[in-house]
Amino acid sequence: MFRRTEAVPFAFVSEADEFRSNVTPPPRERLRPGQVVGRTLLGLTVAAGLVGALVLGMPSLDSTNSPAQQQQSEASDNR
């Protein structure tokens, strides 16, 4: 394996590429049913909010419905 030629103040830094741990991490804790339901409801709420924003915003993004007449203020009529 490749050895570094520059001086390294700590030996573990130079051998970090070769280090393999023999310690296995603890198993993941299972979620309680209440946590699963809560996360599901949160995800559904976020998704419904995004869909609702899209549905409500689509009419304002539609460029085919142009007004037939321009709006003018009444103050400029009598000039």
Image (cartoon, rainbow, N blue to C red):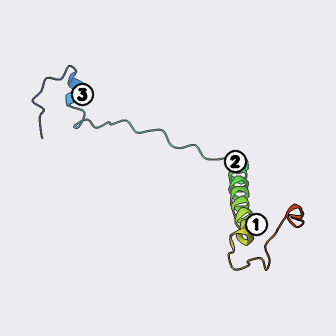
For the residue carrying disc 1, how many other residues have a C-alpha within 10 Å: few (<14), some (14-19), or many (20+)? few
The amino acid pointed to by label 1 is Leu
Q: Quadrant of the N terminus?
A: top left
The amino acid pointed to by label 3 is Val
Secondary structure of the residue carrying tag 2 is: helix
Q: Residue at x 69, y 56 (%)?
A: 46
Q: Which residue is mark 2?
A: 35
Q: CA distance from mark 1 to mark 3?
A: 57 Å
Q: Nearer the observer, disc 1 or disc 3?
A: 1
For the residue carrying disc 3, how many other residues have a C-alpha within 10 Å: few (<14), some (14-19), or many (20+)? few
Q: Is residue 23 above or below residue 64?
A: above
Q: Position of residue 18 (x, y in %)?
A: 22, 37
Q: Quadrant of residue 55?
A: bottom right
Q: Position of residue 5 (x, y in %)?
A: 9, 30
Q: Position of residue 36 (x, y in %)?
A: 68, 52
The amino acid pointed to by label 2 is Gln
Q: Mark 1 and 2 residues: CB-CB less than 8 Å, in contact?
A: no
Residue at the farthest left position: 5
User: Which numbered disc covers residue 13?
Assistant: 3
Q: Which residue is mark 1?
A: 56
Q: CA distance from mark 1 to mark 2?
A: 31 Å
